[in-house]
Image (cartoon, grey):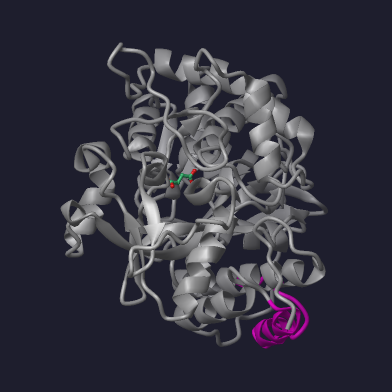
Amino acid sequence: MEEADILVIGSGIGALSVAGQLCKHKRKVTVITKGLKKACNSSLAQGGISVALSKEDDYHYHYEDTMAAGCNLNDPEAVMKLVSTAPGVIKEFIESGMVFDKDEKGELAFGREAAHRLNRVIHAGGDKTGLRVVEQLIRNLTTDVTVKQNEMALDLRVKDGKCCGVITRDDKGEKHIYHANYTILATGGIGQLYPSTSNDVTITGDGLAMAYRAGAKLKNLEFIQFHPTMLTIDGNAYGLVSEACRGAGGILVNEKGERIMEGVHPMKDLAPRDVVARQVYAHTLKGEKIYLDISAVKDFKKKFPTVTSICEEHGVDPDDGKIPVAPGAHFHMGGVEATTEGLTSVEGLYAVGEVACTGVHGANRLASNSLLEGIVFGKLLADYILTHPKKTENFPEEPIKTKLKSLPTKAEIREKMMEFVGIVRHEKKMLDILDWFKQYMPNGEDFTRIDPDSATNEETELYNMVTAGYLIAKAAFSRKESIGAHFIKED
Ligand code: SIN
């Protein structure tokens, strides 16, 4: 048995933000991550952080834009908490050493992304914001934080609605049982359930599946944001082409150079992401190729070094002015129901970042609100822990008899998810995928807890994928109207 006061599962911005705030107060934190510590969606994030810090901005405008992007399905209090706390938290982050890009006057430079009424997005290193933020947060950690890499969380230790830690297995096959006073899920979203995604390879819905098995309430799982512009060649996606490229003047065109967002939405190429993603998708379904025309973007390579290197690695020269694109799964608005301080319905279990659903994003997330969410709600969770001392009872592990059944491949899961619960959904088809998933329930009735020794880490990951896929399909089937990222086409 290993002891941890505060145990964080995951290593993205939410995880590092909580750990960084707690270690300032000399609290001991153990961070467990399935891959290397920088292997997370936050490191890949090209967009920036939206925050009402410019002279012409006001957090009430940020509130209104966030609510409008989320189709007003957001939790208004959670949104207000996010946008009003953000300016102070970001200023504090800058004081801790974080350097954001500046304009020619040496002031913070604010960029534009979809559905923001004014320039509100701050960046670091152009499109390297996520990586720079992660690096700074890692620099801010002290020796009170222990980071365990290449160790996968297999299941939460739960009894009678209380969580007292986690069972993990490292890459040498050794199992570890942790007792913790606070167990925090910061495992990110579910992007790898889809064939094209901007997400890191480690992002397979593990937190969602574990929380479900622990009996935690889940919320809004049907809302999955597809990013309209992944660099896509011959149907294969190779990385994100940031929306900031459209903010800087990029436009979406077909093979004839005709604009595809003309007449579709008043904000054209900067319409909300679900609208743009559906339009690009509709064209690609007809067999057309869609490009991001960047010929009007000055200094593209300097402004977008990450997009440039992804393009060049795959034989696309941005100087030609055209990048082939198609949509890919990007962000999960739904997740483990949590307060803005990270409390879930299971005592002792907390959730922060993309795995959590605080209701802040509603039916569709406003661009660059996710790094912000990780930093701000990470701090609020740390503040909660600092002001709520807690000793969690350590329950003995009870043996589980249920063993894993044979599972589909990742490719099979991804193909089904895209066809049945992808960008466009059909009510009847969603029933079919539910039946398909049900055959993988180990006891024929549910995606229950399994004997952790009956599955390798890879099999546990697949089990988490079928569990998360099933839960997403079930939520999608239950929501009968199209709203935000959940779009149903009548047959
Ligand atoms: C992007 O750079 O387009 C992504 C930004 C975000 O998802 O917030």
Identify the image quadrant of residue 267.
top right
Identify the image quadrant of residue 388.
top right
Q: Which span is picked out in magenta?
A: 426-452
Q: Is 216 above or below relative to 299? A: below
Identify the image quadrant of residue 198.
bottom left
The total number of labels drawn is 0
Give how far across and how far down residue 297 sits, in percent: 28, 42
- The answer to whether any part of residue 360 appears in the image is no
Q: Residue at x 41, y 17 (%)?
A: 94
- The answer to whether any part of residue 316 appears in the image is yes
Give how far across and how far down residue 218 sits, in percent: 74, 55
Q: Between residues 326 and 355, which one lies in front from this camera angle?
A: 326
Q: Between residues 477 and 326, which one lies in front from this camera angle?
A: 326
Q: Residue at x 55, y 37 (%)?
A: 369
Q: Residue at x 65, y 46 (%)?
A: 356
In this rendering, would 129 be left or right of 5? left
Give how far across and how far down residue 126 sits, in percent: 30, 35
In this rendering, would 487 be left or right of 39? right
Magenta span includes 136 = no
The quarter of the picture where the C terminus appears is bottom right
Q: Residue at x 32, y 24 (%)?
A: 101
Q: Between residues 426 and 471, which one lies in front from this camera angle?
A: 426
Give how far across and how far down residue 416 sits, in percent: 57, 81
Magenta span includes 433 = yes
